[in-house]
Image (tube, coloured by chain):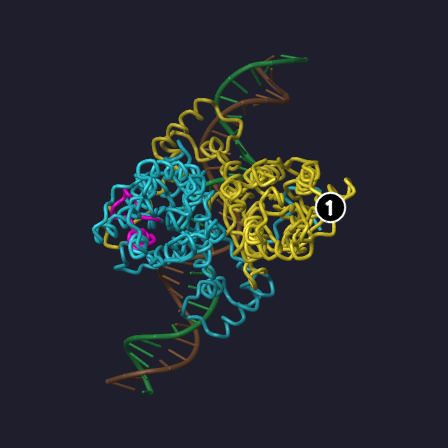
Chain colours: A yellow, B cyan, C brown, D green
DNA sequence: GAACGTTCTGGGAGCGCTCCCAGGTTTTGG
DNA sequence: CCAAAACCTGGGAGCGCTCCCAGAACGTTC
């Protein structure tokens, strides 16, 4: 089919709006109205246009719509903070799936961007330059100034996970505090006496919120909250943190690990130290990754619904774009405990 | 700052190309040439334009560029086949990271699309409508007609993983055949006598290629290749497949599992049957997921570099868009064996 | 039936850029 | 030293759409 003399530019079968208009026997304006679902179109005209569109396989030129109109029909998902770890994470994939599910049917494109060191200004220029209608930010380190910058520029922005340094920017997060508190209470109710935790880095809200929830759960039961080790969301550092805890308190009989991926490392360490799980040490994780069920032993954990996180972020952003008012400044999604064998 | 009467449309601080031109004391054309890195611009003018751009924080309007120019400056990444599983997979995230890395610095947007049932025609219309310059397809089930359709429409397309039903469409894949063969040979060299395999679904090239490689490795050593069970890339089905193999051949002493995620399930089953790994049964996986190292015991596996997969796909696509000729019709990336404790 | 609204329709300006063309300036070479 | 070639520059058409405006067609009311 593409046997033209000039290979690289053989393509361009764009049916244009004008052709649809001609085929339907109406004007460009009417076709435009039909496409955008505007009122004041007779049902006869509407029908004719729909038929013509179907017949010609017409797809509106987004660039032209964006240029002419006031909206870009496009939102950006910005993965901040290098992304090396973020993108490794099943977390990201789940969020993305939710975003896409929520966007289904809407004529909105999703463009993906990553902030790289040095590029920040470019990124801000681009985003604020009217190329996108709104932004979903997935930023790992809480102090990231990006959400603030975007929000200050008047660009509708929703952050995934409570942002530490961006008070006032709308965000959606799992209820990490209550989830962790539930984990702590469960360990107490199970009869554990010396309960420790492996927390995420101090500069990430998710780590801090889970730590706070754990502390609250324990202190309400009048337990000590001194057995805290910090780790950084890798199995290796989880293993190291567990070893540290064991050295500090050889008698510990429970550990709440602030992420399944770290719990995997912790389990290894416990195994290496001859501790039986859950008989000697009970383990509760957080996230409920797919691999939690195949850990040895299968991991009891706090599930968060990451897909719902993506859906909710998108809903919040689209609602704002639609001009809805008095929207909630943040949304917390409930977690649920999944009991398996490790505790 | 946004204290206008009308909240939703307060934003629009776009500096336009014309303002840059005025600020730099040159014409629009010259600014355009500088931005696009064209020749025939005096270094004095070039310098002035760059300064003006920096001063004004100018970012070219993509919509206008697309509309006016012949290129869309945009490529699509299409996740075919529901995406429910795909997006769960760390695989996807790795590819995406590679794509992004390769795109860094290029003025090309990445838009993400998922094909949903019923939407196929819309998707094809959109993609072929000149909105994107090229497409990266991640399609799990090999028979997907999408790549063929796109390629036939003259749209530069690169597929991730060998497509079963789309001969002639350029693709990039890991060298699954040789990786699996290496695994089989390794098990032979280790002295295993009764070697089985858990393969992926028959309608996916990745599963078939790994199975073929395993068969080739064994038959070269004059081993039987009858111990094959099929599974579908979940830990659960991997566990079931392992149980099936054990029932058919209680004396088996090795299993090559065509994906780490299935190997996790297989390990569980072996454990439940009282088989020691690797003493009773040696296990080799494929992929080298992050969790392979925290399996019990740590998994010996064939590593594939998924990020490199993304980079290579992108490179191949961009090369084609740049008009390069005689590009390879497909690219196979080498795998490497990672020896841990399970074999 | 004149005066008004309401519903529908088409014409045309212009979004911000690229790309072609025409013209000016410098370099090169016979 | 003058022609040709190379290098620069600016002007302006037009990409495909939206959105504003003006006006046609149809009631509905006094």
Range of magenta residues: B161-182
Instruction: Name the residue rendered at 46%, 22% in the picture.
Output: A43
Q: Quick check: B131 left or right of A249?
A: left
Residue A244 makes an appearance in the image: yes
Secondary element under disc 1, as helix, strand or loop, is helix
Q: Chain of mark 1?
A: A
Instruction: Name the residue rendered at 74%, 43% in the picture.
Output: A218
D4 in relation to B2, above or below: below
A89 in relation to B30, above or below: above
Residue neighbourhood size for the residue with mark 1, other residues' Cα within 10 Å, grouped as few (<14), some (14–19), many (≥20)? many
- List x then y, in percent, for residue B132: 40, 48
Instruction: Name the residue rendered at 61%, 56% in the picture.
Output: A243
Total marks placed: 1
Instruction: Name the residue rendered at 40%, 51% in the picture.
Output: B278
Magenta run includes residue B324: no
Which is more toward the observer, A188 or B36?
A188
- List x then y, in percent, for residue B4: 70, 45
Magenta run includes residue B166: yes
Q: Which residue is mark 1?
A: A215
- List x then y, in percent, for residue B290: 48, 52
């Amino acid at each position: 089919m593409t046997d033209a003399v000039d290979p690289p530019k053989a393509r361009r079968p764009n049916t244009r709006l004008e052709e649809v208009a001609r085929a339907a026997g109406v004007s460009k304006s009417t076709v435009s109205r039909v496409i955008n679902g505007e009122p004041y179109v007779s049902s006869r005209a509407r029908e004719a246009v729909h038929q013509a569109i179907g017949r010609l396989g017409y797809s509106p030129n987004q660039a032209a719509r964006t240029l002419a109109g006031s909206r870009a029909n496009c939102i950006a998902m910005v993965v901040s903070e290098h992304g090396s770890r973020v993108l490794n994470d099943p977390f990201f994939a789940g969020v993305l799936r939710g975003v896409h599910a929520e966007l289904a049917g809407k004529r909105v494109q999703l463009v993906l961007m990553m902030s790289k060191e040095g590029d920040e200004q470019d990124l801000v220029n681009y985003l604020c330059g009217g190329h996108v209608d709104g932004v979903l930010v997935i930023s790992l380190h809480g102090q990231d100034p990006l959400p603030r910058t975007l929000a200050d520029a008047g660009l509708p922005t929703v952050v995934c996970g409570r942002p530490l340094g961006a008070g006032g920017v709308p965000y959606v997060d799992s209820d990490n505090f209550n989830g962790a508190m539930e984990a702590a209470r469960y360990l107490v109710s199970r009869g554990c006496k010396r309960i420790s935790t492996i927390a995420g880095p101090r500069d990430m809200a998710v780590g801090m919120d889970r730590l706070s929830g754990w502390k609250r759960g324990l202190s309400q039961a009048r337990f000590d909250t001194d057995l805290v080790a910090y780790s950084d969301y890798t199995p290796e550092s989880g293993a190291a943190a567990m070893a540290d805890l064991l050295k500090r308190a050889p008698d510990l009989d429970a550990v709440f690990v602030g992420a399944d991926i770290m719990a995997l490392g912790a389990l290894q360490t416990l195994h290496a130290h001859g501790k039986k799980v859950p008989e000697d040490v009970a383990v509760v994780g957080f996230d409920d990754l797919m691999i939690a069920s195949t850990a040895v032993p299968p991991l009891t954990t706090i599930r968060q619904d990451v897909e719902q996180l993506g859906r909710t972020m998108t809903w919040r952003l689209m609602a704002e774009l639609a001009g809805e008012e008095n929207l909630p400044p943040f949304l917390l999604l409930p977690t649920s405990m999944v009991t398996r064998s490790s505790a």
